[in-house]
């Protein structure tokens, strides 16, 4: 189960509970760990349901635990729901995120490619992030880190193809803390403006930290293995999330920096 599927399952459970009034289009989920998501949706729905937030949360939770892909639900103080997904959630998320054009394809095969324009890119980022942005390509520049992470992910995918290594979600469990942090960042769903800029920076920093600690490509005498295919799937997901997010903000996402 993916976060998007979980959001739909939570809303379906609320309808089955008999919550009156319009429901949101999706449920805001916050990562709480590897395959663990939290939401305060019960507090939002309590008034329309004529119940306490705790009662709404318990009612939703009782229905959610019967949904395939949900391993467990915990109701915390104030009606906060903590939902744990079943094994296989990593592969589900990566497959959902990478269901589209593959990074590294020729530009004409990627829709909505934007020409590189440093001044425009900086202005667009400043507008979204709510502050001035330098054009200097250094780590302290958040826009540079986001674009560098995208270019680095593309380079890993090119390296994988040269070695005959294809990205494969689910080839191995991504258990390192940095990999879990990146998966959580990738699973968050936001649109537009400052929230999108924050998410892209979070994904970029998490991806770069993951690559420092868990190389997606074999190092030294390492033999290509399932873990490398799984890490390349993680890199591919990061590349697509960063490229799509930058395009949404009107910013170019070059393959090389």
Image: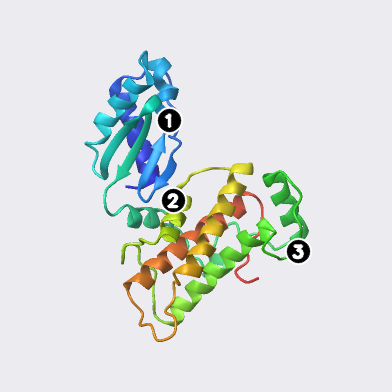
Which one is in front, 144 or 98? 144
Q: Is residue 5 visible?
A: yes
Q: Residue at x 32, y 62 (%)?
A: 173
Q: Is tag 3's residue or tag 1's residue first in the polypeptide sequence?
A: 1
Left or right of residue 133, residue 40 in this image: left
For this orientation, the residue located farthest to the front is 77
Q: Nearer the viewer, residue 25 or 50?
A: 50
Say few, some or many: other residues with alpha carbon within 10 Å of mark 2 (under 14 / 14 to 19 / 20 or more).
many
Q: Position of residue 204 (x, y in %)?
A: 56, 58
Q: Given the current orientation, which residue lies at the most extreme top position?
A: 50
Which residue position holds label 1?
Answer: 40
Count of marks overlaid on the render: 3
Q: Secondary structure at mark 2?
A: helix
Coordinates of residue 154 in the picture (x, y in percent): 53, 69
Q: In the rendered image of this protein, does residue 101 appear above or below residue 44?
A: below
Numbered disc 1: secondary structure: loop
Binning the other alpha carbons within 10 Å of mark 1 as few (below 14), some (14 to 19) or many (20 upward) gives some
The tag on residue 179 is: none
Circle nearer the N terminus (2, 1):
1
On the image, the x and y values in percent for residue 152 come to 56, 69
Residue ID at (60%, 69%):
255
Q: From mark 3 to mark 2, how far is it between C-alphas?
A: 29 Å
How far, Cα to Cα, is label 3 from label 1? 40 Å
Q: Which quadrant of the view contains residue 11?
A: top left
Q: Secondary structure at mark 3?
A: loop
> Residue beneath label 2, please?
184
Q: Crowdedness of circle 3 by 10 Å Cα count: few (<14), some, many (20+)?
A: few
Q: Quadrant of residue 37?
A: top left
Residue placed under numbered mark 3 in the picture:
136
Residue 77 position within the rendered picture, expressed as x and y whole percent measured from the top left = 38, 27
């Amino acid at each position: 189960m993916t976060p998007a599927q979980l959001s739909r399952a939570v809303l379906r459970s609320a309808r089955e509970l008999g919550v009156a009034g319009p429901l949101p289009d999706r449920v805001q989920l916050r990562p709480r760990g590897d395959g663990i998501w939290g939401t305060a949706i019960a507090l939002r729905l309590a008034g329309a349901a004529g119940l306490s937030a705790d009662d709404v949360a318990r009612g939703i939770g009782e229905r959610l635990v019967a949904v395939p892909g949900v391993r467990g639900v915990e109701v915390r103080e104030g009606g906060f729901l903590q939902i744990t997904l079943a094994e296989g959630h990593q592969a589900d998320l990566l497959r959902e995120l990478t269901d589209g054009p593959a990074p590294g394809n020729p530009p004409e095969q990627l829709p909505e490619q934007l020409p590189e324009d440093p001044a425009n890119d900086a202005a667009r980022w400043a507008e979204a992030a709510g502050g001035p942005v330098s054009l200097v390509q250094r780590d302290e520049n958040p826009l540079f880190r986001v674009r560098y992470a995208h270019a680095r992910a593309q380079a890993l995918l090119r390296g994988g193809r040269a070695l005959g290594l294809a990205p494969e979600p689910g080839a191995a469990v991504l258990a390192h803390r940095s990999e879990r942090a990146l998966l959580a960042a990738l699973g968050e769903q936001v649109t537009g403006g400052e929230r999108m800029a924050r998410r892209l920076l979070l994904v970029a920093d998490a991806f770069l930290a993951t690559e420092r600690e868990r190389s997606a490509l074999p190092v030294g005498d390492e033999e290509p293995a399932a873990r490398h295919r799984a890490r390349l799937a993680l890199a591919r997901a990061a590349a697509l999330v960063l490229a799509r997010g930058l395009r949404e903000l009107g910013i170019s996402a070059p393959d090389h920096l």
